[in-house]
Image (tube, rainbow, N blue to C red):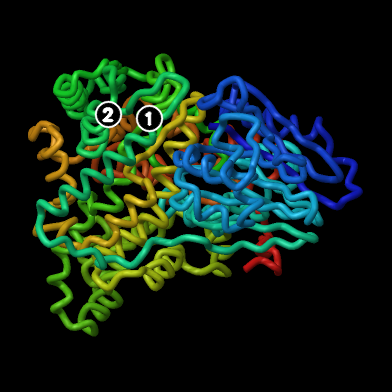
């Protein structure tokens, strides 16, 4: 596991030197505290920070081919590298190390950019071909590892994290208002946008080629068609499911450093731990946290799983200093990020890193097996589609605007009046302007030049390779929420502690097989994750763990906001400094806070997102003296190069 950086410019660009690449590497030191590697030649610089996992002595990067005409920097793990290495050695390639990174350069020699199809794992890499003077970058199929890039004049800059780009090009910190609006609605910024206008995310399953000053981005993988795999019986389905997931877990146990598992006590992480225990010769090290607020302490479920599988369990019950942690995390977050579970994810990563360098997690199960409550809620609301469309439109357009904003059920009635795709998007977003004016007139006017935030979701609905609503919702969530929220959160919080997280449920071969299952294997009546829960029972996960309300890494957010965080919230959101940025309507903010703190309504989610937004400005932008600390009067056009496709 590492962090990678680089710049490629004109051949005679002598300003690209080792000191510049070192500065980029220093910005992501936390991703790889064990080593640094730099290559600079003829206007090209590649760098990496290394967290040593495999081939501790010989795995330094950049890694070269035999004649040093091709070099690569790599972040991630390629789990099938032993098989690939054997094939390449049989074809005459000579290896200098035992690291998985080296298979990339040799396979590129054989297949060019198509080498990416052979890799099984999580990865982001940048490969420079000196003969062709071409840079190839790739991101893994499901987006476990991040990769950002920016075209600045004739230069391409890239990095695992945005901060490495801004370390040498602070002028690129032009705030992207379209992305900020998406954050306010969804709590994250979907790919390929970032919070900075010139900087892009390379989407999962995509390649980027940079040659002669031109960028070309193309997709090399997508989820296959849904509902093409029809098992003859439940037993047949379970046997195949178990064999495939057990193999995905087994290949992720390869490590030259201590390894364990994050255990929330939920279905997904418990099933992964069960399969790890079966494949391991020693007790699995497991890690879990809880909170002293009894309503949010699920540590006893994790403890039950640990006892069932004989793990070496580590548990920490917290009374955290939330304000101090937020100050720390928002100094490192490059974009505003509204998922409050960053806190428990960070805490459990800190706990695990005291004992191991690598952990497995259960992330991804909800998006491929339909585990979220919203899927069953959406299915239940299909009954409202019996009401003629014209009547629902009339009610939404003419009646709802006349209803008191405090009226109970107002949002529900609006939601069920929508067409089903818009209804689903509405249920997973915050409509900032519907209930009260939270955005300033100036910011709202600026935003009119952009499309609606929900347009990004509608585009994924339109290209979903499935006919039924459940499959289409799973596709949209896999492309947006899972990548830009769940996996981003796991990567940033674990890497902040120099911990590698591996995600066996998102093994792409396993995901392709599960995607092919018809929706009734995932949701059966009101039973969410039907076949996966059957598998969990089959491998021994206790029933009281499986059949309980879903919380994941739960936390007492409402309590914190009304107590420990209240002074911070009031002082930050009502500060004239916040108002002067020009994003928010001060009267709307006061009303929002008044309704929440007088307990007339629960606005915890909105308040959290607004607080993180302002703390991001203060603790990330301002502390680095970057531009973009207030809303620009004029917003530039998209920085996507004309040659990009």
The crowding category of the residue bearing disc 1, from other C-alpha atoms within 10 Å (few below 14, some 14 to 19, many at least 20), is some
Can residue 631 be seen at all in this image of the molecule? no
Is 584 positioned to the left or the right of 543 in the image? right
- Looking at marks 1 and 2 on the same chain, the residue that comes earlier in the sequence is marked by 1
Quarter of the picture holding the C terminus: bottom right
| Residue at image coords 80%, 53% | 131
Any mark on residue 449, and which? none
Residue topped by disc 1:
253
Determine which quarter of the picture holds residue 596: top left
The crowding category of the residue bearing disc 2, from other C-alpha atoms within 10 Å (few below 14, some 14 to 19, many at least 20), is some
Q: Position of residue 394 (x, y in %)?
A: 25, 81
| Residue at image coords 43%, 26% | 358
Q: 410 and 428: which one is in front?
A: 428
User: Helix or strand or loop: what does disc 2 sit on?
Assistant: helix
User: Helix or strand or loop: what does disc 1 sit on?
Assistant: loop
Task: Indicate whether 241 appears above or below 414.
Answer: above
Is 540 positioned to the left or the right of 7 in the image? left
Task: Indicate whether 631 appears above or below 315.
Answer: below
Q: 10 and 592: which one is in front?
A: 10
Q: Position of residue 187 (x, y in %)?
A: 42, 48
| Residue at image coords 18%, 47% | 532
Q: 146 and 99: which one is in front?
A: 99
Is 591 positioned to the left or the right of 468 in the image? right
Q: Position of residue 56 (x, y in %)?
A: 56, 21
Can residue 366 be seen at all in this image of the molecule? yes
Residue topped by disc 2:
279
Q: Are marks 1 and 2 in contact (CB under 8 Å)?
A: yes
Q: Position of residue 233 (x, y in %)?
A: 10, 58
Task: Indicate whether 562 appears above or below 226.
Answer: above
| Residue at image coords 42%, 15% | 354
């Amino acid at each position: 596991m590492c962090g990678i950086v680089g710049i490629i410019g004109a051949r005679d660009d002598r300003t690209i030197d080792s000191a510049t690449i070192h500065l980029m590497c220093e910005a992501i030191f936390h991703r790889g505290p064990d080593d640094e590697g730099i290559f600079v030649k003829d206007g090209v610089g590649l760098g990496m920070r290394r967290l040593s996992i495999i081939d501790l002595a010989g795995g330094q990067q950049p890694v070269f081919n035999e004649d040093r005409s091709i070099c690569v920097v790599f972040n991630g793990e390629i789990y099938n590298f032993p098989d690939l290495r054997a094939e390449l050695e049989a074809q005459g390639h000579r290896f200098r190390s035992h690291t998985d990174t080296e298979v990339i350069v040799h396979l590129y020699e054989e297949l060019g950019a198509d080498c990416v199809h052979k890799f099984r794992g999580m990865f982001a890499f940048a490969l420079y071909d000196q003969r062709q003077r071409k840079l190839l970058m790739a991101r893994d199929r499901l987006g476990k590892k991040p990769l950002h890039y920016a075209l600045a004049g004739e230069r391409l800059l890239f990095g695992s994290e945005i901060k490495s780009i801004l370390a040498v090009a602070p002028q690129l910190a032009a705030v992207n208002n379209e992305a900020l609006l998406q954050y306010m609605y969804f709590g994250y910024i979907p790919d390929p946008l970032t919070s900075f206008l010139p900087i892009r995310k390379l989407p999962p399953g995509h390649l980027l080629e940079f040659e002669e000053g031109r960028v070309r981005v193309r997709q090399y993988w997508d989820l296959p068609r849904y509902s093409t795999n029809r098992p003859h019986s439940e037993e047949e389905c379970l046997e195949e499911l178990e064999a495939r997931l057990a193999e995905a877990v087994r290949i992720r146990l390869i490590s030259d450093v201590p390894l364990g598992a994050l255990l929330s006590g939920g279905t997904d992480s418990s099933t992964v731990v069960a399969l790890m225990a079966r494949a391991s010769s020693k007790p699995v090290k497991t890690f879990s946290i809880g909170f002293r607020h009894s309503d949010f302490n699920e540590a006893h479920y994790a403890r039950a799983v640990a006892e069932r599988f004989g793990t070496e369990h580590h548990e920490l019950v917290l009374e955290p200093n939330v304000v101090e942690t937020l100050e720390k995390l928002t100094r490192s977050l490059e974009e505003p990020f509204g998922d409050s579970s960053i806190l428990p994810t960070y805490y459990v990563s800190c706990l695990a890193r005291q004992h191991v360098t690598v952990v497995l997690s259960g992330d991804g199960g909800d998006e491929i097996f339909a585990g979220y409550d919203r899927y069953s809620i959406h299915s239940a609301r299909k009954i409202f589609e019996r009401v003629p469309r014209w009547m629902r439109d009339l009610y939404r357009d003419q009646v709802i605007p006349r209803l008191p904003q405090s009226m109970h059920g107002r949002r529900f009635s609006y939601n069920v009046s929508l067409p089903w795709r818009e209804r689903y998007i509405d249920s997973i977003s915050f409509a900032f302007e519907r209930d009260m004016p939270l955005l300033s007139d100036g910011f709202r006017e600026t935003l009119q030049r952009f499309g609606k935030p929900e347009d990004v979701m509608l585009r994924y609905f339109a290209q979903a390779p499935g006919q039924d609503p459940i499959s289409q919702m799973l596709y949209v969530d896999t492309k947006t929420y899972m990548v830009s929220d769940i996996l981003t959160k796991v990567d940033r919080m674990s890497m902040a502690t120099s911990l590698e997280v591996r995600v066996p449920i998102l093994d792409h071969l396993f995901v392709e097989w599960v995607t092919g299952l018809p929706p009734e294997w995932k949701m059966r009546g009101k039973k969410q994750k039907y076949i996966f829960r059957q598998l969990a029972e089959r491998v021994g996960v206790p029933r009281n763990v499986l059949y309980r309300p879903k919380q994941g890494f739960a936390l007492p957010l409402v309590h914190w906001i009304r107590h420990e965080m209240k002074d911070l919230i009031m002082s930050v959101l009502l500060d004239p400094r916040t108002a002067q940025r020009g994003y928010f309507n001060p009267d709307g903010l006061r009303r929002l806070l008044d309704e929440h703190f007088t307990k007339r309504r629960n606005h915890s989610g909105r308040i959290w997102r607004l607080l993180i937004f302002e703390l991001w400005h203060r603790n990330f932008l301002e502390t680095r003296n970057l531009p973009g600390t207030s809303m620009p009067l004029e917003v530039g056009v998209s920085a996507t190069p004309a040659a990009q496709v």
